[in-house]
Image (cartoon, rainbow, N blue to C red):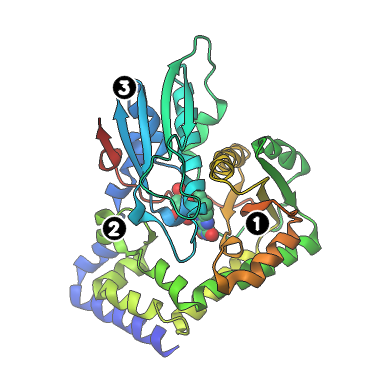
Amino acid sequence: MTNRRNVILGIGGTLALFGAGAAWRVTRVPDKAYQPWEKAGATEIDPRLDAFRHAILAPNPHNMQPWQIRLIGTDQAEISCDLARRLPQTDPFDRQIVIGFGCFIELAGIAASRRGLKLEVEAFPEGAGNARLDARPVARLRFVAEPGLAADPLAAFIRDRRSAKVPFDLARPVPAESFAALQAAGSDLTRFDHTRTEGDVQALRSLASAAFEREMRTPHTLRESIDVLRVGSDEINANPDGISLRGPLFEALSLLGADKVRAEAIDAQSDTTTRQIARYRQMFSQTPSFVWLTGLGNSRAHQLATGRSYLRLNLLATRLGLGLHPVSQALQEYPEMTPLFAEARRLCRVETGETLQMLARLGYADAVAPTPRWPLEAKLTRA
Ligand SMILES: Cc1cc2nc3c(=O)[nH]c(=O)nc-3n(C[C@H](O)[C@H](O)[C@H](O)COP(=O)(O)O)c2cc1C
């Protein structure tokens, strides 16, 4: 409480000090960081650039955007991982990072279909590190003209897709026919499942809350998030990735010094951490249904396929006007999470040999703002 009062007094004092200028500062938005969402609509002569302008909008863990794109010749590209952009504390085997690449590749393919091009994907053409990713490419892509190929109808929803990190409307349950439509996101390697049964939903809400608290109270996993906090427009525009804190409160806090915010947030037992846990518990309690994707195995191919399925699930939900929000904490493979990991498998009826790859909240919510992105040019090289 004392901390909070100090921070608020600090904001008031800072605003008084900066006078009229402060009002302008606190209402700013990090426009530059959102430009890639606009640019995805621009006309491109090279269809690969068009595809990648869409692909960089993919959902991905902590918005680290680990992709590196190398254009080869006139119709190919190689995708590899910027190894410094992984999250080794919460994602020790790079499983979730690979899922993000699956989302990226699926988006590239959907966008390419608008130009009559089929995306041929050679996954891990030189093999893959199973314990950790390494410098070998994640995928080699070829854009192949296919006469008569129809544009994927999900292309229309790419720029409206979000991860809906907000409370959902409990008065508006998700109708049965929506789950039937979302079923299409499954594949040979990945099974789609859902629940909206009160007892099961309540158990998953509690699990999501407990797992979030476990991550926040564990110093090495908390630190991984705090290290990528971007507080206010200046930091977000300078590094349009990670966890971005925006809006008037955070603009004001950034005037006081973003390092102060980080210093308070990095303490696993601080008031700030406790408030954040309470806020998430409240958000999780406003969840009418959960969906999940179970990998029929856990190879790199299964993880990539899960990403492709998850991206389609996210776009299908967008088309239905539904918000989708991954809650991954209980699925993560670090020792402190082990009991909750086991509980997640039990609640989601995961069989021996299978892996729970994605778990997400689903429901109706108000509109959600986009998240920052690096421009395509920052991720692109030519052979
Ligand atoms: C594999 C994977 C796991 C994720 N896990 C979480 C999560 O546990 N909690 C969360 O709030 N968002 C999670 N996300 C969503 C990302 O934070 C989000 O995609 C990223 O911040 C970009 O935002 P956007 O999807 O709205 O464009 C996950 C995304 C992926 C691909």
Given contact means CB atoms under 8 Å apart, are the residues at marks 2 and 3 in contact? no
* Residue type pointed to by label 3: Asp
Q: Residue at x 57, y 54 (%)?
A: 325
Asked if disc 3 is less than 8 Å from ligand 1, the answer is no
* Residue that mark 3 sits on: 46
State which mark lies toward you, 2 or 3: 3
Q: Looking at the rendered structure, which numbered label has been put on residue 199?
A: none
- Left or right of 6 on screen, residue 107: right
In this rendering, the answer to whether 231 lies above or below 112 is below
SS assignment at label 1: loop
Position of residue 209 measured from the top left corner of the image (x, y, whole percent):
62, 70
Position of residue 237 measured from the top left corner of the image (x, y, whole percent):
27, 54
Where residue 177 sits, quadrant-wise, is: top right
Q: Earlier in the sequence, mark 2 or mark 1?
A: 2
Q: Is residue 44 visible?
A: yes
Residues under labels 2 and 1: Cα distance? 29 Å
Task: Tell how many labels.
Answer: 3
* Residue that mark 2 sits on: 28
Q: Earlier in the sequence, mark 3 or mark 1?
A: 3
Q: Is residue 285 visible?
A: no
Q: Quadrant of the C terminus?
A: top left
Q: Nearer the viewer, residue 175 or 346?
A: 346
* Residue type pointed to by label 1: Asp
* Residue type pointed to by label 2: Arg
* Residue that mark 1 sits on: 169
Where residue 244 sits, quadrant-wise, is: bottom left
Position of residue 68 measured from the top left corner of the image (x, y, whole percent):
33, 42
- Left or right of 98 on screen, residue 200: right
Q: Earlier in the sequence, mark 2 or mark 3?
A: 2
